[in-house]
């Protein structure tokens, strides 16, 4: 297999272990590493031949499942395989709801990781979307653009439009336009409700 595999994890040794797994499954693939969510997003945007993203949830710049949502929005055609130490029986379901095709715990053995990487590179389809009411909202969040997600995450941090505009290098009018689009997609009336919806879906859960 040719192409690029992005490994996004803030632990260099674990990135190295994942790189070994990728090399065994796809020895001709190019591996790109990122230690923060911002670096991962840049790498995902720049790699034209990106075939797979291996993502840890616990990364600088990520809160809860926001890393999945952001990278999925950046490159919706690229499969995301989460390899994380996040606890909770529902973590795998939540990861899939936001766009991941699979979830592995970091204590999985190398053979299991290699098998999961091989399945992902082989084009395994995402798990079917759930039918619970919150699943529909998760799909809407997963459908936000990268910029809209960055604006929503800034709102979760309690930032005002002026601060968001400065941080994202855009005008306040543009921030307001994005917030209008976000509220429409999430079917809420104000930014407080939008933040509550995001929190209810785990976007700011600290794992």
Image (cartoon, grey):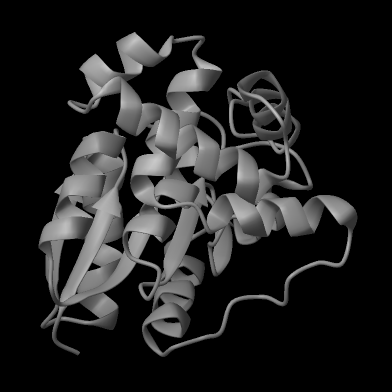
Q: Residue furthest right?
A: 132
Task: Give the total of numbered labels.
Answer: 0
Quadrant containing the C terminus in the rendered view: top right
Vertical relation: 115 (above or below) 142: below
Quadrant containing the N terminus in the rendered view: bottom left
Question: Residue 53 versus residue 192: which sits nearer the camera?
Answer: 192
Question: Residue 101 versus residue 110: which sits nearer the camera?
Answer: 101
Q: Which quadrant of the figure has residue 13?
A: top left
Vertical relation: 47 (above or below) 120: above
Q: Residue at x 68, y 52 (%)?
A: 138
Instruction: Give the left or right position of residue 117, taking residue 163 as reference.
Output: right
Can see residue 197? yes
Q: Residue at x 50, y 20 (%)?
A: 155
Instruction: Give the left or right position of residue 102, taking residue 41 as reference.
Output: right
Which x, y percent locates residue 107? Answer: 53, 48
Q: Residue furthest front?
A: 173
Question: Residue 31 versus residue 186: which sits nearer the camera?
Answer: 186
Vertical relation: 86 (above or below) 168: below
Vertical relation: 147 (above or below) 72: above
Which x, y percent locates residue 67? Answer: 43, 43
Can see residue 60? no
Which x, y percent locates residue 56? Answer: 42, 44
Q: Residue at x 79, y 46 (%)?
A: 89
């Amino acid at each position: 297999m040719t192409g690029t595999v992005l490994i996004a994890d803030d632990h260099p040794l674990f990135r190295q272990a994942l790189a070994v797994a990728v090399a065994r499954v796809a020895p001709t693939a190019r591996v790109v590493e990122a230690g923060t969510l911002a670096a991962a997003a840049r790498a995902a945007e720049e790699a034209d031949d990106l075939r797979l993203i291996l993502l840890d949830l616990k990364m600088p710049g990520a809160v809860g499942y926001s890393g999945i949502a952001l990278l999925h929005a950046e490159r919706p055609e690229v499969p995301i395989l989460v390899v994380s130490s996040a606890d909770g029986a529902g973590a795998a379901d939540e990861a899939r709801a936001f766009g991941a095709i699979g979830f592995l715990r970091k204590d999985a053995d190398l053979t299991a990781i290699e098998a999961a990487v091989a399945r992902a590179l082989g084009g395994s389809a995402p798990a079917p979307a759930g039918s619970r009411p919150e699943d529909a909202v998760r799909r809407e969040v997963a459908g936000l653009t990268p910029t809209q997600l960055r604006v929503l995450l800034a709102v979760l941090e309690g930032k005002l439009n002026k601060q968001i505009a400065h941080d994202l290098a855009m005008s306040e009018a543009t921030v307001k336009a994005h917030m209008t689009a976000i509220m429409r997609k999430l079917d809420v009336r104000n930014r407080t409700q939008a933040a509550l919806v995001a929190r209810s879906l785990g976007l700011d859960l600290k794992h």
